[in-house]
Image (cartoon, rainbow, N blue to C red):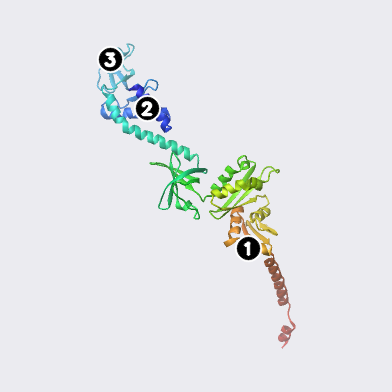
């Protein structure tokens, strides 16, 4: 029995990834629960499991008295001295109170409780493991799709990719291997609930960290990310080393690094721009691939006015305003884009308006004549 118990503890520890000490503590809790349920005894009794031999016992503290009034809490002086001749009245001793037929009862009581305790310990381990991976990328296999929610098998646990976190342009199927961003890990009575995302900007950031050694090494920093999932994204990067081209490093040799990310995101277009401490330069870079003539910034309002060549206006704004919108998200600045012609026309109108105002301000001869009449 004892050797079998030790073997079972060792097996469960390896199989479930639960520390042997945790299993032993659970066993002790099970034994004392079974004892108190089946036998009338000292409520302060505790179970003891020898981790070296596998022997277990129930021990209870008792007070040495002349005449025993409560056998569960007291022991006579004569009985105490049979254990040790030095005991005196008032001493407290620990007595083995394990019932004779306790093994069979303990085994019956322990089975279900042990399974429950092991499941709880296993759930805690899984929760801790995945909680530490929050804000990171994880790879799994799509197990099933129910009510537009996708359930992903992560090996030790199952995660959910909600419909709201899926890319509308992507197609998903059972058995597909997929990379997702871990948004949140919650502890529930049924275990860890892991929420995934394919739309989070963090997914793009982590993919670049995986694909670009210069980012993982800290030579190149990824300053900001703006995404419209499945369609287009912009990232701003900066190099700590003036000899390293941050944009070139992210593109990779022959574009291999960037191409891997684009394939993972199923052809989502990605613009890589250089971050700059000067807001005007940064905004001009963010509007890439459009060319910019000038940028005027208002630091207080975090607003900018950008002038582009006439033939670059549509490119700067982008389809349905996408390029300008992403640039604004990336830089966190308001961006007002105008063409050269628009600016010149506004300047001309301002000049004409000024002339009209001046003329109206001067009294005319007609007006004087009227007054005299």
First of labels 3, 1 by sequence position:
3
Judging by the rendered image, the residue that carries numbered circle 3 is 79
2 vs 3, front mark: 2
Secondary structure under tag 3 reads: helix
The N terminus sits in image quarter: top left
Q: Answer whether residue 24 is visible to the viewer in this image.
A: no
Q: Where's residue 183, x and y in %? A: 49, 46
Q: Quadrant of the C terminus?
A: bottom right
Direction from residue 135 to residue 291 in the image, left or right: right
Residue 119 horizontal/vertical position (percent): 38, 36
Which numbered disc flags the more N-terminal residue, 1 or 2? 2
Which corner quadrant of the image does residue 158 belong to? top left
Q: Which residue occupies the extreme top position in the image? A: 85
Tell me if 183 is positioned left or right of 47 in this view: right
Q: Is mark 2 on a helix, strand or loop?
A: helix
Structural distance between the alpha carbons of marks 3 and 1 = 100 Å
Mark 3, Cα crowd under 10 Å, few <14 / some 14-19 / many 20+, is few
Near mark 2 (Cα within 10 A), the count class, few <14, some 14-19 or many ≥20, is few
* Residue 310 in which image quadrant: bottom right
Where residue 148 appears, x then y in whole percent? 42, 53
């Amino acid at each position: 029995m004892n050797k079998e118990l030790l073997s079972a503890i060792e097996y469960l520890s390896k199989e479930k990834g639960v520390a042997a000490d945790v299993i032993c503590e659970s066993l002790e809790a099970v034994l004392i629960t079974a004892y108190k349920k089946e036998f009338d005894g000292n409520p302060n009794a505790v179970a003891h499991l020898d981790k070296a031999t596998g022997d277990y016992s129930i021990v209870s503290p008792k007070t040495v008295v002349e005449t025993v009034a409560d056998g569960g809490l007291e022991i006579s002086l004569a009985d105490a001295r049979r254990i040790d001749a030095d005991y005196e009245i008032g001493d407290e001793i620990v007595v083995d109170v394990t019932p004779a037929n306790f093994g069979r009862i303990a085994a019956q009581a322990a089975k279900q409780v042990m399974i429950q305790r092991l499941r709880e310990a296993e759930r805690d381990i899984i929760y801790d493991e995945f909680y530490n991976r929050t804000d990171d990328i994880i790879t799994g296999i799509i197990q099933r799709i129910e009510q537009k929610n996708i359930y992903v098998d992560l090996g030790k646990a199952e995660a959910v990719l909600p419909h709201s976190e899926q890319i509308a342009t992507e197609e998903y199927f059972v058995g597909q291997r997929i990379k997702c961003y871990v948004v949140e890990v919650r502890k529930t009575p049924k275990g860890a609930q892991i929420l995934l995302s394919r739309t989070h900007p963090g997914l793009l950031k982590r993919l670049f960290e995986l694909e670009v050694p210069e980012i993982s090494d800290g030579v190149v920093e990824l300053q900001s990310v703006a995404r419209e999932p499945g369609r287009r994204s912009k990232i701003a990067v900066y190099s700590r080393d003036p000899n390293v081209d941050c944009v070139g490093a992210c593109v990779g040799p022959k574009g291999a690094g960037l191409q891997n990310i684009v394939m993972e995101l199923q052809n989502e277009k990605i613009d890589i721009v250089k971050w700059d401490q000067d807001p005007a330069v940064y905004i001009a870079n963010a509007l890439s691939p459009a060319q910019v003539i000038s940028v005027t910034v208002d630091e207080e309002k975090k607003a900018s006015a950008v002038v582009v060549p006439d033939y670059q206006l549509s490119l700067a704004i982008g389809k349905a305003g996408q390029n300008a919108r992403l640039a604004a998200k990336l830089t966190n600045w308001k961006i007002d884009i105008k063409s050269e012609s628009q600016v010149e026309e506004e300047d001309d109108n301002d000049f004409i308006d000024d002339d009209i105002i001046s003329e109206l301000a001067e009294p005319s001869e007609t007006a004087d004549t009227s007054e005299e009449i």
